[in-house]
């Protein structure tokens, strides 16, 4: 009887853990993108993420072999990621154009890009500050998609070197 009870408990706990780990691919993709885009010393300007059945595929370009490895490590830590296919190409920074712009100009341009984007405009996400090309996002939003979109839109503005996020996603519970 005790063995049967233990087996049932293990089966129940294993099943619950498996259910908790199952996340929709779109959710895993967005969480992975956010994690990568907010990681120090990792340029995600030319990095793409796709997810199929929990398997994340990274493709595009990074500046160094270390960034390629870091991208894989960060992706593996995201809840719901079963494995990572790292297809990133290493392309040195010297082959990329860097535009020098003032922090005030960058902030103005990121805010304008947010206003022009229907997912971000009324999302509750804002530019908290810009320091030496590093954009800090803040606020509370109900949409994981808006959070991912805001990081991507900010990163696309010329002169942005990195995006950091303190955005809180307050997803409605089902």
Image: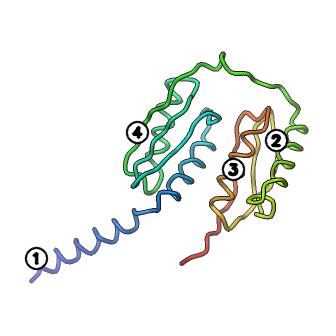
Circle 3 — which element?
strand
The answer to which of marks 4 and 3 sits earlier in the sequence is 4
Instruction: Determine whether, in the image, residue 137 is placed left or right of residue 74.
Output: right
Q: Are marks 2 and 3 in contact (CB under 8 Å)?
A: no
Q: 10 Å neighbourhood of mark 3: few (<14), some, or many (≥20)?
A: many
Image vertical order of residue 98 relative to residue 49, above or below: above
Relative image position of residue 165 (x, y in whole percent): 69, 50
Instruction: Determine whether, in the image, residue 19 is placed left or right of residue 42.
Output: left
Q: 119 or 139, which is in the foreground?
A: 119
The answer to which of marks 2 and 3 sits earlier in the sequence is 2
Q: 10 Å neighbourhood of mark 4: few (<14), some, or many (≥20)?
A: some
Look at discs 1 and 3 and give the one toward the viewer. Answer: 3
Quadrant for the N terminus, please: bottom left
Look at discs 1 and 4 and give the one toward the viewer. Answer: 4
What residue does disc 3 label? Answer: 165
Circle 2 — which element?
strand
The answer to which of marks 2 and 1 sits earlier in the sequence is 1
Q: Are marks 2 and 4 in contact (CB under 8 Å)?
A: no
Circle 4 — which element?
strand
The answer to which of marks 2 and 4 sits earlier in the sequence is 4
């Amino acid at each position: 009887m005790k063995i049967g009870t233990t087996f049932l408990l293990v089966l129940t706990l294993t099943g619950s853990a498996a259910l908790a780990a199952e996340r929709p691919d779109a959710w895993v993709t967005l969480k992975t993108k956010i994690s990568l885009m907010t990681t120090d010393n990792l340029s995600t300007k030319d990095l793409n993420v796709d997810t199929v059945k929990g398997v994340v595929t990274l493709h595009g370009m990074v500046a160094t072999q270390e960034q390629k490895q870091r991208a894989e490590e960060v992706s593996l830590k995201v809840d719901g990621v079963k494995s990572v296919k790292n297809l990133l190409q290493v392309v040195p920074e010297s082959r990329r154009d860097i535009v020098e712009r003032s922090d005030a100009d960058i902030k103005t341009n990121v805010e304008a890009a947010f206003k022009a984007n229907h997912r971000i405009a009324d999302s509750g996400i804002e530019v908290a500050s810009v320091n030496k090309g590093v954009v800090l996002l803040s606020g509370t939003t109900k949409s994981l998609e808006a959070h991912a979109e805001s990081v991507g839109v900010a990163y696309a503005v010329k002169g942005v070197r990195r995006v950091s996020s303190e955005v809180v996603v307050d997803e409605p519970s089902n």
